Amino acid sequence: MLQAAFDERGIDARHELLDVTVPQLAGVIDEVRGGDFLGAQVTIPHKERVVPLLDRLTEEAQATGAVNTITKEGKRLVGHNTDVAGFRVALDRLVGRQKMPKQAIVLGAGGGSRAVTYGLITGGFQRVVVFNRHLHRAEALVKHFTKSAAHMELRAMPWHVSIIEAELLKTRILINATSIGLHGDVSPLPAEIIPAGLLVMDLIYNPPQTRFLRDAVAAGADTTTNGLEMLLHQGTAQFELWTGQSAPLDLMRERLDAALAAREESADDAAADASAASAAAGSGAPAVPAGE
Ligand SMILES: NC(=O)c1ccc[n+]([C@@H]2O[C@H](COP(=O)([O-])OP(=O)(O)OC[C@H]3O[C@@H](n4cnc5c(N)ncnc54)[C@H](OP(=O)(O)O)[C@@H]3O)[C@@H](O)[C@H]2O)c1
């Protein structure tokens, strides 16, 4: 979507993928500093590790302790976190014309959760509860935001179904920021504890309709959304930071949809191949359709 945006705006830039190991990170950042770069994107597992290698952080990057975007001011590198801006747009879409709720539950305490939690803290929420499999990570997140969340109640709670169930009855917004559902048709929560009437977001965008979202719909959710809107808008924010121009939103959405559809198709093909192979292996026949 970013290359399409550069091309559309006539900007002579190439969006390239670099596979960077942890020991290579500092060297690559030096290359970005000295070379002919507009900036860089940073993703798992480097979002936090890159922070000390930069010269300045924006408020969101400072507050979350994570950087997903680097821009350049001469030879100085500035770290941004556009996941927060992307989440804010996604949240606004989820809530629509209703009044913004004041309470939310966040599942997960990784990098995605940090962007979400900061978006909620700065979005006027009064009570946010973060559940995580490893409680210490949720507690560290809450500690990290002590200052930003001084005006509201931000709590870490242990991942016990009965506690989550009780908290779900006190909230309007439920967000999955774990990676459960990214691989395999699984949900972080038992379907039967999801109450009706919630606004539900899954940060996962591929698959587009996770079991978590399907269970929420079946339970009578008010509205649900996947992570596509957040992904799109963190990308449009990056484009604007690098170029100073407005992003071609519709084109970027189109390209993103097309890329995800292509990925889904190839995943379906792979699954069909695998099931043909296992059926064939089960019957002792060669793994090719009959007649070929
Ligand atoms: N839409 C977007 O733009 C966007 C942006 C950022 C992230 N995301 C998505 O959000 C998800 C999380 O990303 P991240 O960067 O936060 O990853 P991360 O830092 O690796 O965190 C993963 C989270 O998932 C939890 N988790 C993983 N497997 C689990 C399991 N089997 N049982 C219980 N908890 C489990 C982890 O819990 P523990 O701490 O206990 O291990 C942790 O809270 C991913 O699916 C990612 O694709 C989407």
Image: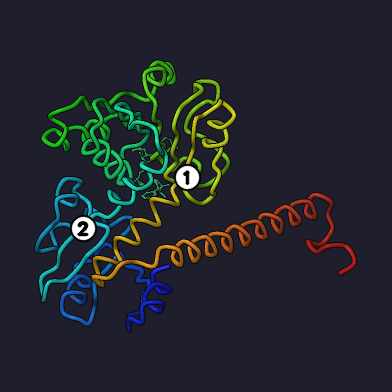
Q: Quadrant of residue 93?
A: top left
Label 1, label 2: how many angstroms apart (C-alpha)?
A: 23 Å
Q: Are marks 1 and 2 in contact (CB under 8 Å)?
A: no
Tell me if 46 is positioned left or right of 191 in this view. Answer: left
Q: Which residue is mark 1?
A: 226
Q: Mark 2 is on which residue type?
A: His
Check disc 2 and report the residue beneath it: 80
Give the vertical position of 49 relative to 242 (above or below): above
Disc 1 residue lies near ligand 1 with CB under 8 A: yes
The disc placed on residue 252 is none
Q: Quadrant of ligand 1?
A: top left
Q: Mark 2: which secondary structure?
A: strand
- Label 1 secondary element: loop
Q: Position of residue 115 (x, y in %)?
A: 28, 45
Residue 113: x, y in percent?
31, 41
How many numbered markers are drawn?
2
